Image (cartoon, coloured by chain):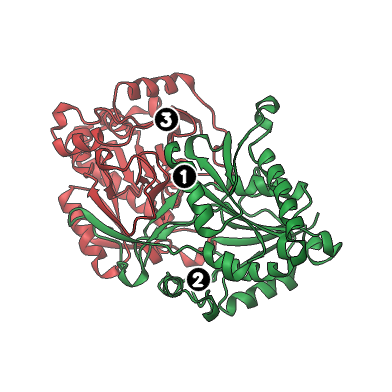
Chain colours: A red, B green
Amino acid sequence: MNFMVSEFAMDKGNIIEEEDGDGEIQSFFNSAPPLRNNGNDINAKLECFNEMNINGGRRRRRRIVCVTSGGTTVPLEQRCVRYIDNFSSGHRGATSTEYFIKAGYSVIFLYRRGTFQPFCCSLPDDPLLQLQDSYSEAVKRAIADHHSMLRMIAISFNKHGPNAMFYLAAAVSDFYVPWQTMAEHKIESASGPLNMQLAQVPKMLPVLRQHWAPKAFLISFKLETDSKILLKKAAAALEKYKMDMVVANELSTRKEEVVVVTRTENIRVRRDMNLGVDDDVEHPLIQLLVQRHSTHINTNSDLC
Amino acid sequence: MNFMVSEFAMDKGNIIEEEDGDGEIQSFFNSAPPLRNNGNDINAKLECFNEMNINGGRRRRRRIVCVTSGGTTVPLEQRCVRYIDNFSSGHRGATSTEYFIKAGYSVIFLYRRGTFQPFCCSLPDDPLLQLQDSYSEAVKRAIADHHSMLRMIAISFNKHGPNAMFYLAAAVSDFYVPWQTMAEHKIESASGPLNMQLAQVPKMLPVLRQHWAPKAFLISFKLETDSKILLKKAAAALEKYKMDMVVANELSTRKEEVVVVTRTENIRVRRDMNLGVDDDVEHPLIQLLVQRHSTHINTNSDLC
């Protein structure tokens, strides 16, 4: 297995080009905080596992997955002291990546700095992976051209047709404070209660489905704390965003079981208790996904 | 040097006893989220450095400091998916602790799990320190009796009179969502913008000064992003909370310089650039604090 690591910042520039035609998303990225391109501030990284398998080898049977992992944050002040975060540790994305690699997939792993990484749970934040300069430069160029990581990956995935999978496990922020309305300085605590209005982050899933990777096998996640509404919300997301599958998980049991929601069925997937603590729910989950991806590839083989 | 480590949870119980007489604070702790007493949920730990020096040795000249370190978070949902955090890494508290120990102080280090720890910057989250069971049990008992860590430490410090110092470097949350008004489940993102009203966290500094440790040498911190208001706000805090010193730091330069604000002067303290990256601003800062603590001890020697 080859590792390749490249590190860069997302840019707030024109992530959506004109043909994507979504004013709300364009407006969101235009009003997002500027991200700085230095080592301390970059909080997103890209890693490619099984890279030789991506660019060479048996072209026809090659399978590739983009895994997004970890949470995102939104600042409450322009000179940020406080921010809204979420509980995500990146465990789901990192563990799933291990099983995708074992299943022979090439994996693009897009994660937040400091969150779990595949095969590196006991290593420090920045494991020493081999840096392949040529690729690193290509990524930097793409970013300098005002493209986002996800868009860049999606479009480069397009040539793989139905062989490409997106496994969107990252817990992205739902709400944010637009840059123009954000306090510049640390918000004063002496002047009474704080009223905050948070805007909704526009959804990228429709753009991914319709414009960036229309032929890919798309899997999104739905996490809720209320099991009564979980499956309904997962089914609604499946329909609304035209996903191939939605993985529904409840906060308190997410490490034990998930429900994979498709257009025709709800499949409950549980961690194998007989295997003890060494097993995890991602093991049977990725097995199921690989099977269904095979069906997707066969059904859409004319698109290859 | 002896290390001792003990681990426990703060309890939302009666942190303020009747004699403290502050309804707002009592109400805050009564409406705080319940904290769970298991290894995964505990995010505060207590460590004692130079413990032998605390309980034995030259009684008359013994000096002791309680250092609080790292940030705190406030949940936005009862079954917490999202929370408000702040940038604090605990670097100030951990580095300062090293210099206090070098200056011969006994140190109680109260920090958030996962933040920097003295002498352990390159070690994993839970360095292997010697656990002294007898002390651990005493701490657990105190907590079970519904006392907070800070209160327990403050009251046990009282016998040290002016020899005790509190160095309150932790970045505690200024705003919170009261438990009763907090959404139980993950807040829905589909129903438009989110309006949040955050209440002010009541200040503990007056209680510490007036009730818990009236004779101690008290140092609090003021961090701002706007240098124009920093010194004014630090001076206001010094006056309002009857601190002995307020360390004023600006977000962007906090690792290079701070200003120590006292009733009679503002003392600018800078990292020694001649010593290169190996030095830090905490080095001259703790030197200054130790000198001023000596003056405080001499001035108040009748209280020893």
Q: Residues within 10 Å of mark 2 (few under 14, many from 20)?
A: some
The x, y position of residue B141, in whole percent, is 64, 78
Which residue is at 50% across, 71% downward? B36
The x, y position of residue B87, in whole percent, is 47, 46
Q: Disc 3 marks which amino acid?
A: Asn
- Does label 2 or label 1 sit earlier along the sequence? 2
Q: Is residue A115 visible to the viewer in this orientation of the structure?
A: no
Q: Is residue A277 visible to the viewer in this orientation of the structure?
A: yes
Q: Which label was assigned to residue B289?
A: none
- Residue ID for mark 3: A53
> Measured along the vertical axis of the image, is residue B99 above or below residue A224?
above
Q: SS at mark 1?
A: helix
Do tags 3 and 1 sit on the same chain? no
Q: SS at mark 3?
A: helix
Q: Residues within 10 Å of mark 3 (few under 14, many from 20)?
A: some
Instruction: Check contact, mark 2 vs mark 3: CB within 8 A.
Output: no
Pair 2/3: label in front: 2
Residue nearest the viewer, comparing A198 with A277: A198
- Residue ID for mark 1: B232
How far apart marks 2 and 3 lie (CA) works out to: 47 Å
Q: How many marks?
A: 3
Q: Disc 1 marks which amino acid?
A: Lys
Q: Is residue A102 left or right of residue B91?
A: left
Q: Is residue A115 left or right of residue A167?
A: right
How far apart marks 3 and 1 lie (CA) works out to: 61 Å
Which residue is at 56% across, 56% downward? B113
The x, y position of residue A244, in whole percent, is 23, 48
Residue nearest the viewer, comparing B180 with A205: B180
- Residue ID for mark 2: B36
Q: SS at mark 2?
A: loop
Q: Residues within 10 Å of mark 1 (few under 14, many from 20)?
A: few
